[in-house]
Image (spheres, helix red, strand yellow):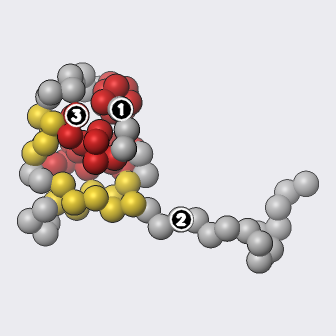
Amino acid sequence: MDPNPDDETSMPDPEPKIVILPPALTLRDLAQVLGLKPWELTKTLIGMGLFCKADSVLDFVTAAAVCSEHGVIAKQANGK
């Protein structure tokens, strides 16, 4: 039986997690911020057509794309 969307007992979608990132950081550091293992992010990046090791430096745009793939909103530390 499908749950009734108007049912008051249904849980609302949780607020997305927001992280503040520097202009560049290593894949390992990003994994730590997201609470994931570096290999999980490597897998995500391979799916995006990139291969990076744990000590590879990611720019903000790439890191934000990885965050988005994991349901996290990334904001740059300097407010951009």
Q: CA distance from mark 2 to mark 1?
A: 23 Å
Question: Can you identify the residue that label 3 sits on?
Answer: 28
Q: Position of residue 10 (x, y in %)?
A: 73, 68
Task: Using the image, tell me which numbered label, if any, was put on residue 37.
Answer: 1
User: How many marks can you see?
Assistant: 3
Q: Count neighbours of disc 1 (C-alpha within 10 A) and say few if under 14, some if 14 to 19, many if 20 or more.
A: some
- Residue at point 39% right, 60% down? 17
Going from the N terminus, do you reach mark 3 or mark 2 first?
2
Q: What amino acid is at disc 3?
A: Arg
Disc 2 vs disc 1: which is toward the camera? 1
Looking at the image, residue 35 sits to the left or right of residue 80; the answer is right
- SS under mark 3: helix
- Compared with 74, 27 (above or below) is above
Q: Position of residue 54 (x, y in %)?
A: 21, 26
Going from the N terminus, do you reach mark 1 or mark 3 first?
3
Q: What amino acid is at disc 2?
A: Pro
